[in-house]
Structure formats: C-alpha cells, structure tokens
Image: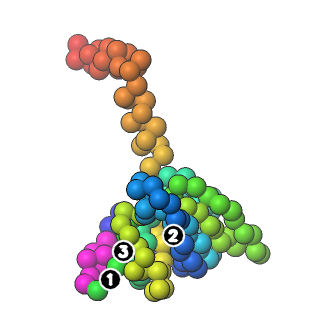
C-alpha cells in the first residue's frame, strides 16, 4: 500500500458537515465526488464503486505515495464511508454522494480543492472479528485451535 498512484481516486465536488448535537456525530460529513479515476485498477475486473466500510484518505492534494502524506503544509485525514446516498450516471461515468466519518475535523480543508483516495474496505475484517468474538462460538474455536496442537 506504499504506492497510492494506482488507487481509485476522485476530486471532491462538495463536503457538507452533518449537524447534530450528539458528541459522537461531530466529525460526520456528506461527500460528493465527480468521476472516479483509476476505477478499474485492482484485482478484479469490476469498476470501483463506493461501499459501506470503505476507508479513504481525504487530502488537499493528490498523494502518489504514503511518504507524500508527511510533507509539511499539506492537510489530510482518514475517512470511513458509512452510507451511500445516491449515484448519478452520466455517459457511464459515476459521481457518488456518500456519508463519511472523519478521523479529525476537516472544516479547515473544505475551502481548498480536495481529493479522496480509496485505500481498502474494512467490512470483511469486521465480520471476521465479530465471528471470532461471539460467545457461542468460543468453545468451537478453542476445540479447533487445540486440535492443531495434537
């Protein structure tokens, strides 16, 4: 994941903060992007489309490598997709609107030109974690792990 240049990315059209009095919703935003670039890169043949659980970097520049994120004067944040609001289809090009949670307040980034770069989807990891930590399955998992010790 050192090289970000081949990851799907898009220029951000707008970022709107979701207002709520709840403390746990303070870094929630609605992001609207234009067409995704590098949408066919990756392991599959399907074009990239935003899904729940996608992790992105939101930055005021287009990083090519992870080291680019350490440059002084540049601002960026991790964001997690929490829901897709809609897709606009125009001549087989997709612009996406989706909800995100940011790792920090990104209000100071909004007046600038922004890019969003796809990193990974955490949904499979969450499913594995939840399956391993279910109370009903712990005895079964212990038996399986002990069987390999024999």
Instruction: Mark 1 and mark 3 in contact? Answer it, CB < 8 Å.
Output: yes
Residue drawn 31% across the image and 75% down it: 69
Q: Nearer the viewer, residue 41 or 80?
A: 80
Q: CA distance from mark 1 to mark 3?
A: 7 Å
Q: Nearer the viewer, residue 76 or 147?
A: 76
Label 3 residue SS: strand
Pointer 2 residue: 17
Judge whether 53 appears above or below 18 on screen: above
| Residue 69 sits inside the magenta stretch | yes
Pointer 3 residue: 76
Q: CA distance from mark 2 to mark 3?
A: 16 Å
Q: Nearer the viewer, mark 1 or mark 2?
A: 2
Q: CA distance from mark 1 to mark 2?
A: 21 Å
Q: How many marks?
A: 3
Pointer 1 residue: 74
Label 2 residue SS: strand
Question: Is residue 86 visible to us here?
Answer: yes
Label 1 residue SS: loop
Quarter holding the C terminus? top left
Instruction: Mark 1 and mark 2 in contact? Answer it, CB < 8 Å.
Output: no
Question: Is residue 101 visible to us here?
Answer: no
Mark with earlier residue (1, 2): 2
Residue drawn 36% across the image and 28% down it: 133
Residue 17: x and y in percent read 51, 69
First to last magenta residue range: 62-72
Q: Nearer the viewer, residue 107 or 117?
A: 107
State left or right for residue 60 relative to residue 143. right
Judge whether 142 appears above or below 77 on screen: above
Residue drawn 72% across the image and 69% down it: 88
């Amino acid at each position: 994941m050192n090289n970000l240049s081949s990851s799907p990315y898009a220029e951000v059209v707008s970022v709107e903060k979701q207002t709520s009095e709840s403390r746990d919703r303070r870094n929630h935003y609605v992001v609207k992007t234009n067409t995704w670039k590098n949408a066919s890169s990756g392991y599959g043949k399907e074009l990239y489309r935003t899904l729940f659980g996608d992790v992105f970097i939101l930055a005021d520049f287009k990083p090519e490598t992870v080291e680019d994120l350490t440059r002084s004067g540049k601002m960026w944040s991790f964001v997690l997709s929490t829901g897709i609001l809609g897709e606009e289809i125009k001549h087989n090009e997709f612009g996406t609107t989706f909800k995100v949670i940011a790792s920090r307040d990104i209000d100071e980034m909004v007046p600038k030109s922004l890019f969003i770069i796809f990193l990974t989807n955490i949904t499979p990891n969450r499913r594995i974690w939840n399956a391993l930590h279910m109370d009903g399955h712990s005895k079964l998992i212990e038996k399986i792990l002990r069987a390999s010790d024999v």
